[in-house]
Image (spheres, grey):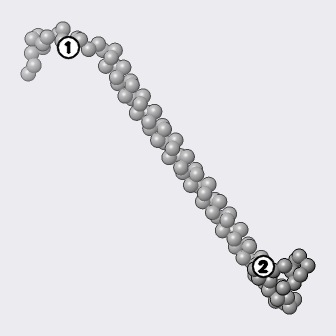
Amino acid sequence: MLQVQELPWKIVNIVPVNEIVFNIVISATLFFLLSFISFSIAFMMYSKNKTTQQINIKLKNANEQLKEYASTVEENAYFTGEKPCGKGCTRYFGTDT
């Protein structure tokens, strides 16, 4: 057991209470500030990921529609008897290769 009467009270009272409270307040404030910053960064990354997923879905749908359109064009070309126009084709510029 510690004898309270024998403690050197002048040494104990050197650190004022307001410094102890100030240190606690600063520590708590830094904790909440860093937590808020971390949460903000995590939320921004989540929303960016969500936006990227939505854009990828739109691109997949557009790609499927483009494939359907290309197959329709190929079918029309087959039924009309046109030969397929490959790379470097100038059919639409007046000279047919």
Question: In the image, 77: left or right of 28?
Answer: right
Above or below 35: residue 7: above
Q: Residue 11: where, in percent of width, then height?
A: 18, 12
Of tags 2 and 1, which is closer to the observer?
Answer: 2
Residue highlighted by disc 2? 88
Question: In the image, 79: left or right of 14?
Answer: right
Kindly report the distance in space between the C-alpha atoms of the residues bearing marks 2 and 1: 91 Å
- The answer to whether residue 54 shows anywhere in this view is yes
Give the image quarter of residue 3.
Answer: top left
- Which one is in front, 52 or 90? 90
Question: In the image, 77: left or right of 59?
Answer: right
Query: Which quadrant: the N terminus?
Result: top left
Q: Residue 36: where, in percent of width, then height?
A: 48, 37
- The answer to whether residue 75 shows anywhere in this view is no
Q: Which residue is drawn at 91% across and 79% down?
A: 94
Q: Is mark 1 on a helix, strand or loop?
A: helix
Q: What element carries label 2?
A: loop
Q: Residue 52: where, in percent of width, then height?
A: 60, 57
Classify 10 Å Cα crowding around label 1: few (below 14), some (14-19), many (20 and above): few
Residue highlighted by disc 1? 12
Q: Which residue lies furthest to the top in this view?
A: 10
Above or below 93: residue 80: below
Q: Which of marks 2 and 1 is nearer the N terminus?
A: 1
Q: How many marks?
A: 2
Q: Say what amino acid the circle numbered 1 marks.
A: Val
- Which one is in front, 90 or 26? 90
Q: Say what amino acid the circle numbered 2 marks.
A: Gly
